[in-house]
Amino acid sequence: MPEMPEVETIRLELQKELKGKRIVQVEVVRDRPLVNSSAEKFSKSVEGSTVTEVKRRSKIIVVNLSTGQTMLIHLKMTGRLLYKLIDSPVDKHTHIVFKLDGGHELQFRDVRKFGYIKLVSGSGLSEIKELAELGPEATELSLAEFERLLTSKRKGKIKPILMDQNFLSGLGNVYADEVLFYAGVLPIRDVSALSAKEISLIYEGIQKILPAAVKHRGSSVNSYVDIFENPGEYVPRLKVYGREGQPCFQCSGFVERTKIGGRSAYFCPKCQK
DNA sequence: AGCTGTACCTGCAGGC
DNA sequence: TGCCTGCAGGTACAGC
């Protein structure tokens, strides 16, 4: 479900609610999300540990534990982490429940079952190999670095490249469309044909849109909610995503939709070249 | 190397 | 009402 702004919203809340809390018990309802561990082994490793820090890398939530181990949680399309009073009802898509001291629990729910929880050793973002191999955080690189990445490393259409987490971390289908609209660049444009001005506008769009979306607690286009089940508030600010056939906010034209790499891409054919 | 399509799952909306 | 199709914010992998 989520891209960087949604994952970051969840991370900020988890850091506030979970830091310093002890995981008293782990209830594995379904072990499917546990990609590198059995239910027994996972529970045994995590039970009794305290959450020391909740970080984020790309779209992955990184939960450091007092044991020196770290849980990597990827929500993929429909994963949710819900912070609830202890022993709250679970639904048929609840897979894992972390019972915490202090009267709360964290439920991991995932309708489509793409999400995962992986237990790894180490705690630093750079020492965990699954994280170290990802591309730089989209909001933590300079224009010069972005230019260098884009011009030296890649060829092909700009949108799929922006969404490739090994190239740049944080953008997904929604914000890639929004950034390209901001930059006035069509999603099918080949990176090799982009001007310096266009590259700099794409960079600028990323630096403006992602933090603004974090500020508004993400976008709930489909089913995203935070740990308290509140939707994000950025949807009314989306300029093109999900607006096929509707008037462009910037010109007299209309937003169109096409398909790139199997995903919907929304754009304004008049504003984007 | 880098594209494209497909797969992983389930639910929901829209058309007939 | 019900059946069918297409679609969904992410990624990995096979095959060209």
Image (cartoon, coloured by chain):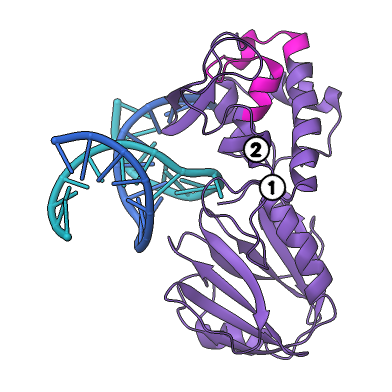
Chain colours: A purple, B blue, C cyan
Where in the figure is residue A236, as x and y percent of width and height?
A: 65, 38
| Spatial separation of the CA atoms under disc 1 and disc 2 | 7 Å
What crowding class fits label 2: few (fewer than 14 Cα within 10 Å), some (14-19), or many (20 or more)?
few
Residue under label 2, please give it: A236
User: In the picture provided, is C9 more to the left or to the right than A213?
Assistant: left
Identify which residue, A150 or A113, lies in the foreground: A113
Above or below residue A149? Residue A138 is below
Left or right? Give the position of A90 relative to A184.
left
Query: The magenta stretch spans which residues?
Result: A178-198
Q: Quadrant of residue A199?
A: top right
Quarter the C terminus of chain A occupies: top right
Residue under the image location 78 percent in, 89 percent down = A102
Q: Position of residue A187 (x, y in %)?
A: 56, 20
Q: Is residue A75 positioned above or below A108 on the image? A: above
Q: Could you say whether the residue bearing mark 1 is in a helix, strand or loop?
A: loop
Residue bearing mark 1: A233
Which of the pair A119/A91 is nearer the observer?
A: A91
Q: Is residue C1 above or below residue B4?
A: below
Mark 1 and 2 residues: CB-CB less than 8 Å, in contact?
yes
Quadrant hosting residue B15: top left
Q: Is residue A82 magenta?
A: no
* Amino acid type at mark 1: Glu
Relative image position of residue A221 (x, y in whole percent): 55, 45
> In the image, are marks 1 and 2 on the same chain?
yes
Which amino acid lies under the numbered mark 2 shown in the image of this protein?
Pro
Residue at position x 41%, y 33% in the image: A262
Query: Residue under mark 1: which chain is it in?
Result: A
Residue A194 part of the magenta-drawn span: yes
